[in-house]
Amino acid sequence: MTDKNDDNVPTAEQVLRFLAANPDFLKQIAAPDAKPDAADGKIVDLTPAIARRARNEARKIGLQNKSILNLAAENMVNWQRLHHAALALLAAADIDQLFHVIATEFPSIFDLESCQLISASAHFQQNVSKDGPIFCPDDVLASLTGGNSLVLGAPESTLCALLGIAPASVAIIALPDRLVDPVAETLLVLCGQKKSSFTPDLSSDLLVLLAELVGVALTARLGMSGEVNVQ
């Protein structure tokens, strides 16, 4: 609590005398359109300033609500895309059709420049499907992610060399490592059309879920064809 005997702290009477002698002081603080009372020029009407502040706050709230609605709409679209991708994966009759879905249908579903699997698995190295995974050694695969399960942003030169293109941005997602070896040694690479398509601050939930869907679908198809033991 302020000590009234402190010479550096003005008393209430001093404040009132100061305001009476300087009527323009509150006018400068309040707002340009705040006007002194016509009776004595000493009392400032703060109503316009308060009203303007209320309007500004209401405008901010309106913009926030609009942003929330836009975000909700965007999330709904992304969930719909994920649903379409899941249906396309389920419709694939064999492993080659599954690769075809990822390479040719995912780009249109997710508005991508391209989509590709990259794997260090020797099992996939023997696959002759034109849409099959790009093979690379283990050390190269590890360098693409730096030990992370998800990488977002501008592509490194090593990735561009593997893909044969230089995407504006990429999302590199490791397929779940708890699945069978061919799948656990594979990355899903989404190539964005713009630099803003994949940025480090992008929410990763849907991307991780997409990689899990792809991983499970690959494991199921490999198991059905007898190529791997999924037990």
Image: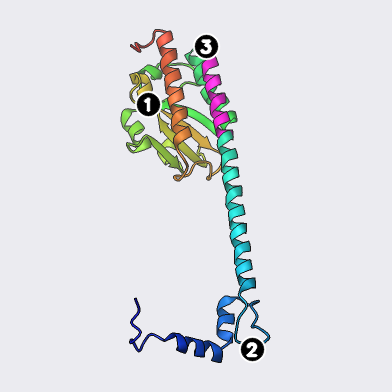
The amino acid on which the numbered mark 3 sits, given as a three-letter code, is Ala
Q: Is residue 179 visible?
A: yes
Please state the extent of the stretch shown in magenta in the rendering: 77-92
The amino acid on which the numbered mark 2 sits, given as a three-letter code, is Asp
What is the chief secondary structure element of the magenta stretch?
helix
Q: Is 211 contained in the magenta span?
A: no
Q: Label 3: state its secondary structure.
A: loop
For the point 58% across and 54% down, which residue is it? 61
Residue 123: percent from left, percent from top: 37, 17
> Tags 1 and 3 in contact by the CB under 8 Å rule?
no
User: Which of marks 1 and 2 precedes in the sequence?
Assistant: 2
The amino acid on which the numbered mark 1 sits, given as a three-letter code, is Pro
Residue 11: percent from left, percent from top: 42, 86
Image quarter hosting the N terminus? bottom left
Residue toward you, 64 or 206: 64
Q: Nearer the viewer, mark 2 or mark 1?
A: 2
Q: Which residue is mark 2?
A: 40
For the point 46% across and 33% down, which residue is it? 207
In the image, which disc is placed on residue 93?
3
The part of the image, by quadrant, that contains residue 187 is top left
Q: Is 81 contained in the magenta span?
A: yes
User: Which of marks 2 and 3 precedes in the sequence?
Assistant: 2
Residue toward you, 72 or 27: 27
For the point 52% across and 19% down, which residue is it? 89
Residue 180: percent from left, percent from top: 34, 18
User: Which of marks 3 and 1 precedes in the sequence?
Assistant: 3
In the image, which disc is placed on residue 176?
1
How crowded pointer 3 is (Cα within 10 Å; few <14, some 14-19, many 20+) is rated as few
- CA gap, disc 1 and disc 3: 22 Å
Going by the image, does 128 lie left or right of 137?
right
For the point 43% across and 16% down, which residue is it? 127
